[in-house]
Image: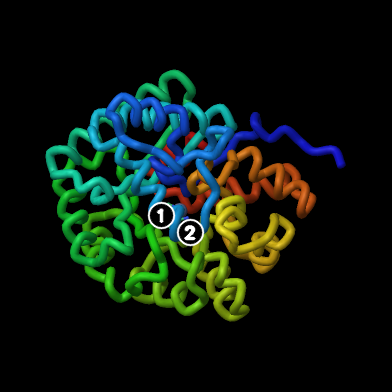
Amino acid sequence: PFLTDWRAFPKLELHLHLEGAAPPALVRRLGAAQAIPLDGLFDAAGRYAASDFTSFLVAYERMSRVFAKPETYRELAEAVLAEQAAHGVIYTEIFISPPSLGFTSAEWLTMLAAIEEGANAAEASHGIVCRLIPVVIRHHGPEKALEAVRTVLAAPRGRMRGFGLAGDERRFTAADFIRPFAEMAEAGFRLTAHAGEFCGPQNVRDTLDLLHVERLGHGVRAVENPELVRRLAEEAIALELCPGSNIALGLYPDFASHPIDALRRAGCAVTVSTDDPPFFHTTISDEYLGLEAAFGYGEPEFAAFNRAALDAAFCEPALKTSLA
Ligand code: ADE
Ligand code: ZN
């Protein structure tokens, strides 16, 4: 069938991990320059090698070591935003993770300043606007999460607007992260958390009840419980869906099997993002293409997803108005 080139279609992307979006060529160059071995990370074509979730998280942390010098984040942020802009993204929220490299507070300030510079440069050359969501990493545990919260709250807010939870959903529970989420909410940060990706409906319910998030990273497995789907729709909990990521990590065999269409029809606030695009061999235009091919989506559906993303965005109202 005839499919569309979606690159020029204006998009908002709410769910993307900064290191997870690092272009392989940049990672190889920084790795070579610092003599950091990266064997096994890439396939013969130079792409990130495919893997299951556990090995993906290991590869992610290994790869991130090329960014151990916080200054390198300027180039990373600019490259990632330029790539998003090339695929029609006009506004994005990006996850950054203070504890992942074991940065000291001073290094974290340097990293944040570098990201702000990269974001300024990308906005000037490509028009793409970005806001940041610091995330704590589940499998690093609640104590590291609280330390990260202290680090974040001590820094100038810059583009930071939200707070979230990423990492291995099968480790710890929502209850373990009540305090960091409560403290960040108190400080005015908007909340999201990965849930319902590798665990089922109960973890989605706990995340809503205990962490009081307004959005869910993925949340797809809520589809296994119709009552929970009704709740998501009624409470207008935005779903940061990343179909290509779910397919690459083996949750669903293909786009046609992805719950996005069931969730959309049930009235949920569906948005579409890429998560860690080069790791999952995708781009946001490829996501749109896969959805067009599987479900026949066109401009009306994609415009609705982008309106839902605008509603759920954590940015200031004046910026929302200018994006509308
Ligand atoms: N960190 C980067 N990508 C992730 C994902 N898909 N789930 C949880 N944590 C992540
Ligand atoms: Zn994610």
Residue 184, above or below 286: below
At a point 65% along the width and 60% down the height, the residue shown is 260
Pinpoint residue 83: horizontal percent, then vertical percent: 51, 29
User: On the rendered structure, is 271 left or right of 297?
Assistant: left
Q: Hey, which residue is sitting farthest right in the picture?
A: 1
For residue 265, above or below residue 275:
below
- Quadrant of the image occupied by residue 115: top left
Residue 108 visible in the picture: yes
Mark 1 crowd level (few <14, some 14–19, many ≥20, 10 Å Cα): some
Which quarter of the figure is the N terminus placed in? top right
**Label of residue 53 in the image:** 2
Where is 24 relative to 312, above or below? above
The x, y position of residue 190, in whole percent, is 34, 55
CA gap, disc 1 to disc 2?
6 Å
Could you tell me if residue 118 is visible in this image?
no
- Asked if disc 1 is less than 8 Å from ligand 1, the answer is yes
**Does residue 263 appear to the left or right of 112 in the view shown?**
right
- Residue linked to disc 1: 57
Give the SS element for disc 2: helix
